[in-house]
């Protein structure tokens, strides 16, 4: 893209909410994986 | 953390719907679980067909406006049946659900998904897609896939935790 | 026949990996979750293809194009389902081989497979003439409806495998015990 992308209001809202969802998803699933790892470490060392 | 008080779940489980689901295992498994899973397939198809199109993975030679509009029609049907069967199942095991963290994770993801679809994704995709920054479309598609897969996965884990 | 199948299941059961998967809470449940979630991909695409044949989705777009363009995604889904399905069976072979629901599911799967082959052959041999019509010809619509029905049955019986209402340790009528392949409890 040559010209600087100008986002409309709905595009900005879409980017913000998508980033929020992706961020929340990464945090949630990251924590789940971490919990399991800790549990397995406690069980098997 | 919990969106509704324990009293609501106690009431739900003692309601007629809760009684039916608890008493008749066959109805719970078929009209509840099986309808829920078939609706998941339809919902998954609607979400993935339109999001894969936005990502440019399928149906590249079909206008993405057409794909998004048609998929949304079936998304609404699937969402209705999936919530109806979900409410029926939830009523039967309501008190257990109140103490189930996967259930609450699912409810948060579901609320996020529904708000995202009806307040952001659909209003955005209703217009001419060539006027939308392609990276915005791709970002929306990734978020949409993630949120609905998360709703389904946390939903499955209600039964395991 | 039932004896032989059960012996095979017992042999599978005795292999170390079968025990490891069943005994691992996270491994077994994540394989199960993957198996269930993949319906979004495999059956999701299949349903859209079938609905197009019935004229209920994207009627203005070529039906054959929809079928062909969604085929790869659908197949990827089916491969994942097949692999995770085999692993689930492998983890609980002696229970599953004697489940009447599992047996009905396998028959329905076979039916869905044969139906899909016939459908594909018939679709390709007549494609040019009706492709852009909102609805496929009656015999293909029948195939699409049959596909939806068979897969709904596969999903339902698949879910029911978890329930032991008609398992061999129950008091079953002789015909049902035979159909479930009851050899041991």
Image (cartoon, coloured by chain):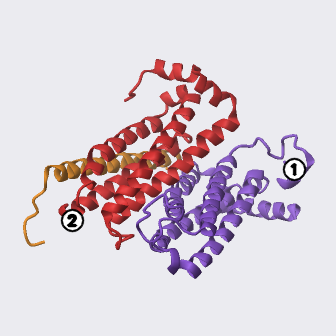
Chain colours: A orange, B red, C purple
Residue B72, image x, y percentages: 38, 52
Where does residue B3 sit, x and y in percent of width and height?
38, 28
Q: Residue furthest left?
A: A3
Taking the image as shown, residue C116 lies to the left or right of residue B73, namely right
Residue C106 % position (x, y): 72, 61
Tag 2–tag 1 contact (CB < 8 Å): no
The answer to whether residue B100 is left or right of residue B30 is left
Q: Nearer the viewer, residue C44 or C58?
A: C58
* SS at badge 2: helix
Which is more foreground, mark 2 or mark 1? Answer: 2
Dot 1: chain letter: C
Q: Is residue C15 left or right of residue B14?
A: right
Identify the residue at image location x=50%, y=80%.
C128
Q: Residue placed at 27% from the left, 54% from the top?
A: B126
Q: Is residue C15 visible?
A: yes
Residue that label 1 marks: C177
Checking the image for residue B130, the label placed there is: 2
């Amino acid at each position: 893209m040559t010209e600087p992308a100008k986002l409309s209001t709905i595009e900005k809202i879409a980017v913000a909410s998508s980033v929020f969802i992706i961020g929340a998803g990464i945090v949630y699933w990251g924590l789940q994986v971490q919990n399991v790892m800790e549990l397995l470490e406690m069980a098997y060392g | 953390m919990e969106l509704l008080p324990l009293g609501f779940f106690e009431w739900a489980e003692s309601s007629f719907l809760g009684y039916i689901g608890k008493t008749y295992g066959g109805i719970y498994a078929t009209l509840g679980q099986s309808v829920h899973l078939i609706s998941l397939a339809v919902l998954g198809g609607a979400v993935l067909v339109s999001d894969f199109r936005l990502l440019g993975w399928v149906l590249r030679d079909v206008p993405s406006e057409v794909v998004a509009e048609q998929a949304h029609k079936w998304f609404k049907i699937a969402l209705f049946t999936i919530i109806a069967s979900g409410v029926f199942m939830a009523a039967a095991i309501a008190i257990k659900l109140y103490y189930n963290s996967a259930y609450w994770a699912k409810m948060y993801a579901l609320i996020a998904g529904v708000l995202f679809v009806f307040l952001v994704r659909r209003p955005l995709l209703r217009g001419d897609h060539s006027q939308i920054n392609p990276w915005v479309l791709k970002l929306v598609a990734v978020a949409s896939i993630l949120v609905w897969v998360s709703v389904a996965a946390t939903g499955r884990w209600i039964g395991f935790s | 026949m039932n004896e032989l199948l059960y012996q095979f299941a017992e042999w599978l059961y005795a292999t170390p990996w079968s025990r490891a998967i069943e005994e691992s809470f996270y491994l077994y449940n994540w394989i199960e979750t993957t198996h269930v979630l993949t319906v979004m991909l495999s059956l999701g695409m299949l349903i859209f293809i079938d609905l197009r044949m019935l004229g209920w989705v994207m009627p203005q777009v070529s039906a054959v194009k929809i079928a062909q363009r969604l085929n790869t995604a659908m197949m990827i889904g089916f491969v994942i389902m097949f692999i995770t399905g085999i692993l689930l069976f492998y983890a609980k072979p002696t229970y599953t081989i004697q489940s009447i629901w599992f047996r009905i599911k396998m028959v329905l799967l076979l039916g869905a497979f044969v139906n899909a082959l016939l459908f594909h052959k018939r679709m390709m041999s007549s494609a040019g003439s009706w492709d852009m019509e909102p609805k496929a010809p009656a015999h293909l619509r029948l195939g699409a409806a049959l596909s939806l029905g068979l897969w709904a049955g596969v999903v339902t019986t698949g879910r029911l495998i978890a329930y032991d209402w008609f398992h061999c340790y129950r008091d079953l009528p002789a015909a049902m015990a035979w159909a479930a392949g009851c050899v041991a409890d």
